[in-house]
Image (tube, rainbow, N blue to C red):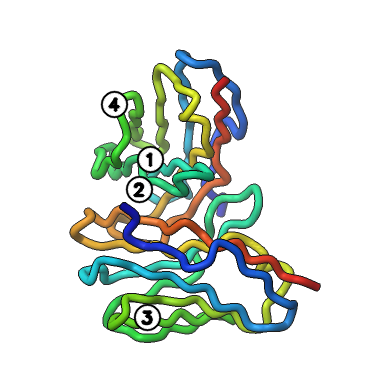
């Protein structure tokens, strides 16, 4: 079965607001998580990653939070822009799975003008 | 630097036929992975190649096969096509192995009639 899963399949956000996309994982041995963004007609694009020895990591307008206690991670997008409209996937990569990326189902983010 | 190039972008086949998809990785990248993306199953790992060797294989039937050439270009083949093989086939490359940061192409959209 799926080892990473997203909480909501869709998210509608007002332009300029912050977006929060959530993801849960089931395997406590998972130690490396990645977020990807897929725009319509394109392949997934790497956004940011985080290892299990970290709780938080920041990039440009994005922050990933990892809560190992409840096996939850989230992607926060600050000041959401129309170009942020896409499907967002969380994925895990762990040695026990031979480092094969295991993707969640995806959350479709729609930015309202 | 050119991105990952996949050909053909779109193709239509009938049941029972076979298909070969091609992937040219980013220059210098030696690892190539293939994923199948469908609305129902999401992104599923097919296989990974590094230095012409298959390192990992996903849970797909033997009708799905692949190979990598000495220049890191890769091909995947699906024989005896079934309707359920209709999907977007994504190729991703990375400089090395055991990384979550993959660079995806735009995919080959296969429709089986």
Instruction: Please name which of the two marks, 4 or 1, marks the residue nearer to the observer.
Output: 4
* Numbered-mark total: 4
Q: Which of B20 and B87 is in front in this view?
A: B87
Mark 2 to mark 1 CA distance (whole Å): 6 Å
C-alpha span from label 3 to label 1:
35 Å
Chain holding disc 4: B
**Foreground of the two, B47 or A65:** A65
> Distance between the Cα atoms at labels 2 and 3?
31 Å
**Is there a contact, CB below 8 Å, between mark 3 and mark 1?**
no
Relative side of A67 to A42, left or right: left
Q: Measured from the top left, where is residue A32 in percent x and y?
A: 31, 69
Q: What element carries label 3?
A: strand
Mark drawn on residue B62: 4
Q: Are the residues tagged 2 and 1 within 8 Å (C-beta)? A: yes
Marks 4/1 same chain: yes
Residue B75, given in percent of the width and then of the height, sits at 41, 31
Residue at which label 1 appears: B72
Which residue bears the numbered disc 2? B30
Output the chain of dot 3. A
Q: Residues within 10 Å of mark 3 (few under 14, many from 20)?
A: many
Badge 4 and badge 3 in a common chain: no
Q: From mark 4 to mark 1, how far is it between C-alphas?
A: 22 Å
Which callout, 3 or 1, points to the residue nearer the camera? 3
The answer to whether residue B97 is left or right of residue A13 is: left
């Amino acid at each position: 079965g799926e080892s990473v899963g997203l909480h909501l399949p869709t998210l509608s956000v007002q332009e300029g607001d912050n977006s929060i996309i959530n993801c849960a994982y089931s395997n406590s041995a998972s130690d490396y998580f990645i977020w990807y963004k897929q725009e319509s007609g394109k392949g997934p694009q790497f956004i940011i990653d985080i290892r299990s020895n970290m709780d938080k990591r920041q990039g440009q307008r994005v922050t990933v939070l990892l809560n190992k206690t409840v096996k939850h991670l989230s992607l926060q997008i600050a000041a959401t822009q129309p170009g942020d409209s896409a499907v967002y996937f969380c994925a895990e990569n762990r040695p026990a799975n031979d480092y094969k990326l295991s993707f969640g189902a995806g959350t479709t983010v729609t930015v309202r003008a | 630097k050119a991105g990952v190039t996949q050909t053909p972008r779109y193709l239509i086949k009938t049941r029972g036929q076979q298909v070969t998809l091609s992937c040219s990785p980013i220059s210098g990248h030696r690892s190539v992975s293939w994923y199948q993306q469908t609305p129902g199953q999401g992104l599923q790992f097919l296989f990974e190649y590094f230095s012409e060797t298959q390192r990992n294989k996903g849970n797909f039937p033997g009708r799905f096969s692949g190979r990598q050439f000495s220049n890191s270009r890769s091909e995947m083949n699906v024989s005896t096509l079934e309707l359920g093989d209709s999907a977007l086939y994504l190729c991703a490359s990375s400089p090395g192995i055991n990384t979550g940061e993959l660079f995806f192409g735009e995919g080959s959209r296969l429709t089986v009639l």
